[in-house]
Image (cartoon, grey):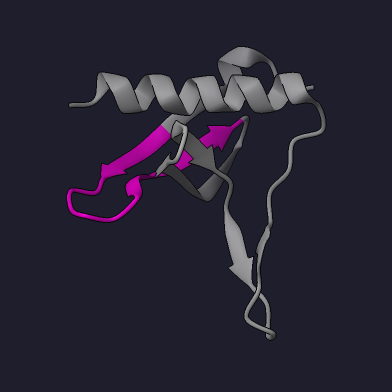
């Protein structure tokens, strides 16, 4: 089981421009790095978008999922904290 201290942001690139994407983020989960998270400006404010892939039919699908809602919330909190701390 991955402990909370095993979850950290290893790269955060802020995107300045008119796009709804505000940052691209890579996260270390234990001994693994997952690339492709994004901080996005939505209708209800900022949120973390999971890594996605485009299918042959042109539809986008998440390619990373958490097992529990608590794990997802820890991931989102970690990414958003790093985003807010990096100015």
Q: Nearer the viewer, residue 10 or 46?
A: 46
Residue at 64% over, 22% down = 73
Which quarter of the figure is the N terminus placed in? top right
Dominant secondary-structure state across the stretch colored magenta: strand
Residue 61 in the image, given as x and y percentages of width and height: 68, 62
Residue at 40% over, 35% down = 10
Q: Place residue 87 in its image quadrant.
A: top left
The number of callouts visible is: 0
Residue at 50% over, 50% down = 35
Extent of the magenta region: 10-29
Q: Which of 37 and 60 is in front in this view?
A: 60
Q: Place residue 29 in its image quadrant.
A: top right
Residue 66 in the image, given as x and y percentages of width and height: 74, 35
Q: Nearer the viewer, residue 77 or 31?
A: 77
In-image side of 77 versus 41 (left or right): right
The reply to whether the magenta stretch includes residue 65 is no
In-image side of 74 versus 82 (left or right): right
Q: In this view, does 5 lie above or below 36?
A: above
Q: In this view, does 60 lie above or below 12?
A: below
Residue at 28% over, 44% down = 13
In-image side of 28 versus 60 (left or right): left
Residue 44 in the image, given as x and y percentages of width and height: 47, 32
Residue 3 in the image, given as x and y percentages of width and height: 68, 15
The reply to whether the magenta stretch includes residue 14 is yes
């Amino acid at each position: 089981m991955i402990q909370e201290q095993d979850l950290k942001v290893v790269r955060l690139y802020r995107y300045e421009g008119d796009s709804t994407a505000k940052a691209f983020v890579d996260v270390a989960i234990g001994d693994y790095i997952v690339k492709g998270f994004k901080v996005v400006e939505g209708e209800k404010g900022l949120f973390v978008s999971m890594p996605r892939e485009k299918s042959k039919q042109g539809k986008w699908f998440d390619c990373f999922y958490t097992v529990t809602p608590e794990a997802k919330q820890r991931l989102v909190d970690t990414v958003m904290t790093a985003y807010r701390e990096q100015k």
